[in-house]
Image (tube, rainbow, N blue to C red):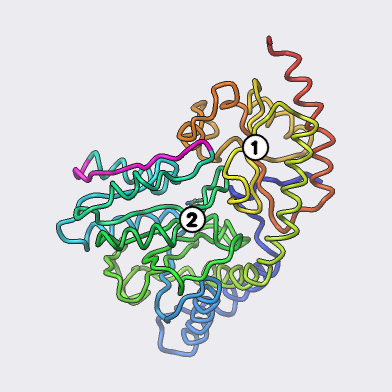
Amino acid sequence: MPIYLDNNATTRVDPAVVAAMLPYFTEQFGNASSSHAFGATVAGGVKAARKSLQALLGTAFDHEIVFTSGGTEADNTALLSALATQEGRTEIVTTAVEHPAVLSLADHLEATRGIIVHRIGVDGRGRLDLDAYARALGPRTALASVMWANNETGTLFPVAELAAMAHAAGALFHTDAVQAVGKVPIDLKFTEIDILSLSGHKLHGPKGIGALYVRKGTPFRPLIWGGPQERRRRGGTENVPGIIGLGAAAALALEKLPEELTRVRALRDRLEEGIRQQAAPCLVLGDGDNRLPNTANIAFEHLEGEAMLHNLNKAGIAASLGSACASGSMEPSHVLRAMQVPASALRGAIRFSFSRDNTVDDVDRVLQVLPEITAKLRATVPA
Ligand SMILES: *Cc1c(COP(=O)(O)O)cnc(C)c1O
């Protein structure tokens, strides 16, 4: 059985999620907007899915969830909505380590619309430069957008504090929580976060479905214009099976969160400890304990990540190079460059990302083959 340790790229759809979705491809095929019985049952299912997301996020009010086609659309909507609704504010404050769903849109807005983008840097552990963040916020800031957890290193950002700082400057605050939802507790009631993005396929739900949380009263402009779906916040007939799947995935994520924080974390820690002992020299990247419980990003000194992945893959182990989006290109990841990872380790970073599907046997299998791979590859590089 191949071992899958690339859960930050995507997760296996939970069989219970598939089971929940199936009727919505067959008997429950109605359009949620139709006023007849076919529509009503489907609308009921969609409503229940919304409730289960609300429970996972700890939101206070109904109607704060807008379904989207995924995390990327959610992020795009958040940035463009804020710029459209924040009169006279033409700047965005974000970080140098966001997902391309935020960063490439920010680049595009800067190049084509004269939007000023402040990309706040991080230190060697991936922690945001809070002074630079505070200095960048001002009367021209439309939105501050900072991810809850970094997809490459798992480093967690102090989003509640960052949201309060953005509000003090009169700006909106958005967080890309795609990697955080289901892996760490989230209770939006106790934060000032205005807009949050999440994605189904990162939490054992289907691909092509995601959601935005938009706090009640937050000014909003749709990205997709069309019919009156989603209270006119996102046009287009709902992806009903996807929404049902996301709802089921959210309910499971809430139930399994304690396991994520204990058993999954212990697997990750066992791997890191084993690698430190058997495959050094290496660096565990990210902010110590202030990380997602499932993510290990380990930079192996003087090794090529590509070669390691190739050898791991041959041994039936799937991991990834820094980020799924950066792999394929030979450029070292923008996140590790922002962290100023030493040149000797920059190309040798491998991300192992766990989920509740993994077992101790998976970890022990990796620890059985990885030291041989690193020893073999190190023997071929000149000292
Ligand atoms: C995967 C991911 C996205 C994109 O979500 P999709 O649903 O794949 O579009 C955005 N942000 C982060 C942090 C991610 O990990």
Q: Position of residue 194 (x, y in %)?
A: 36, 66
Whether the magenta-drawn stretch holds residue 34 is answered as no
Q: Which residue is mark 2?
A: 148
Q: What residue appears at the point 16 percent right and 61 percent down from the top-left corner? A: 87
Q: Position of residue 155 (x, y in %)?
A: 55, 48
- The reply to whether callout 1 and callout 2 are in contact (CB within 8 Å) is no
Q: Amino acid at mark 1?
A: Val
Say what secondary structure mark 1 lies in.
strand
Comparing 166 with 229, the one in front is: 166
Comparing 112 with 260, the one in front is: 260
Q: Which residue is mark 1?
A: 284
Whether the magenta-drawn stretch holds residue 118 is answered as yes
Q: Position of residue 166 (x, y in %)?
A: 32, 58
Q: Range of the magenta residues?
A: 112-124
Q: What residue appears at the point 58 percent right and 51 percent down from the top-left corner? A: 290
Q: Is residue 335 above or below residue 245?
A: above
Q: Amino acid at mark 2?
A: Trp
Say what secondary structure mark 2 lies in.
loop
Comparing 381 with 51, the one in front is: 381
Q: Is residue 44 above or below residue 254?
A: below
Q: Is residue 70 above or below residue 369?
A: below
Q: Pointer 1: residues within 10 angstroms few (<14), some, or many (20+)?
A: some
Farthest residue in the left direction?
88
